[in-house]
Amino acid sequence: MPGLPSSVRIREVGPRDGFQNEPETIASADKVRLIDMLSAAGLARIEVTSFVRPDVIPQLSDAAEVLAAVQRRDGVSFSVLIPNERGLERALELRERFDEVSVFLSASETHNQRNVNRSVEDSLVGLEATLDRAGDAGLRREGVIATSFGCPYEGEVAVERVFAIAERLAAAGCDEVGFGDTTGMANPRQVHGFFAAARERLGGVELTAHFHNTRGQGLANVVAALEEGVESFESSFGELGGCPVPPGSTGNVSTEDVVSMLHEMGVETGVELPRLIEASRAAQEILGRPLGAHVLRAGPVDWQRD
């Protein structure tokens, strides 16, 4: 396809965004094994865990243990999600074990209140201080804006509002801003217009797309973003994940589906698809249920041609 990037960067968020939504506790050793499999598959950016309060997300209460145990590989960048300065303090005790931090907030007031019990402005003020300290520690910084393409409580979210938040995050030191379709409300036409405007408004900041497959449009939205020149995506192996609020918000677009599609389109990712599928199969065994990724069930197109 003409005009597409020749390669893209993928950040694997399953070990954080995916695991945190699982109702049964996953053993720390199993988390470490899966993360090691993902890094061995060629995923150069992996969100390993989050330093949130253990009583809020018990699944991630072993953040320090997991981060200390995962294998570090040359060329693989580990990131952690940081909710606030207190979380950053905990993470910095293991500073040598990771390279990047992500901070997050919602574009809509209602979703932000229900997700973190703060107003958007209060979240921004707190995150600006957190980002400043992360910069002092020499960490690469990403700001993620949830509900960028629509809110399940408020409906349409004004693009101007999303971009104003993105500009605040960039001014606070974010090298990268991720736009999250948190409950799968985006459509390809909307994505085209959004990223065309974002390129003009947010020059100098890496733009990242984070789509969910709640309504089956995840891959179509990836293509739409790709056609607008987006070269950075977040996805989750096996289609793990979702949004804790509201109910019914299913998983992120699957990493193996994204990788398989991009490779068929001639866009390189650096990921070894068979090894990635092995990781998702291992996750299925650990969780004791089938995962939603299409390529995991059907296999890549090349295999079908053999």
Image (cartoon, rainbow, N blue to C red):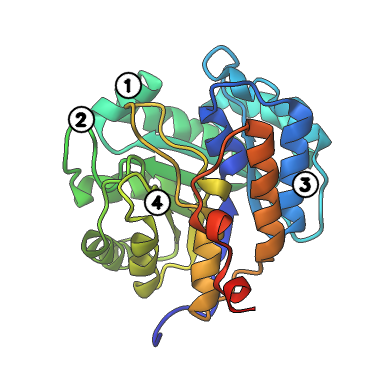
* First in residue order: circle 2 vs circle 1: 1
Viewport quadrant of the C terminus: bottom right
Q: Nearer the viewer, residue 256 or 150?
A: 256
Type of the residue with mark 2: Tyr
Q: Which residue is mark 2?
A: 153
Viewport quadrant of the N terminus: bottom left
Q: Position of residue 270 (x, y in %)?
A: 66, 69
Per the model, the C-alpha gap separating discs 3 and 4 is: 24 Å
* First in residue order: circle 2 vs circle 4: 2
| Residues at circles 1 and 4 in contact by the CB criterion of under 8 Å | no
Q: Which residue is mark 1?
A: 114
| Residues at circles 2 and 1 in contact by the CB criterion of under 8 Å | yes
Q: Say what secondary structure mark 2 lies in.
A: loop
Mark 1 or mark 4, whichever is nearer to me? 4
| Residues at circles 3 and 2 in contact by the CB criterion of under 8 Å | no
Location of residue 244 with respect to 41 vertically, above or below: above
Type of the residue with mark 3: Asp
Location of residue 186 with respect to 219 vertically, above or below: above
* First in residue order: circle 3 vs circle 4: 3
Residue occupying the point 34% across, 61% down: 221
Type of the residue with mark 1: Arg
Considering every residue shown, the one lying at the far bottom of the view is 2
Q: Say what secondary structure mark 3 lies in.
A: helix
* First in residue order: circle 1 vs circle 4: 1
Type of the residue with mark 4: Phe
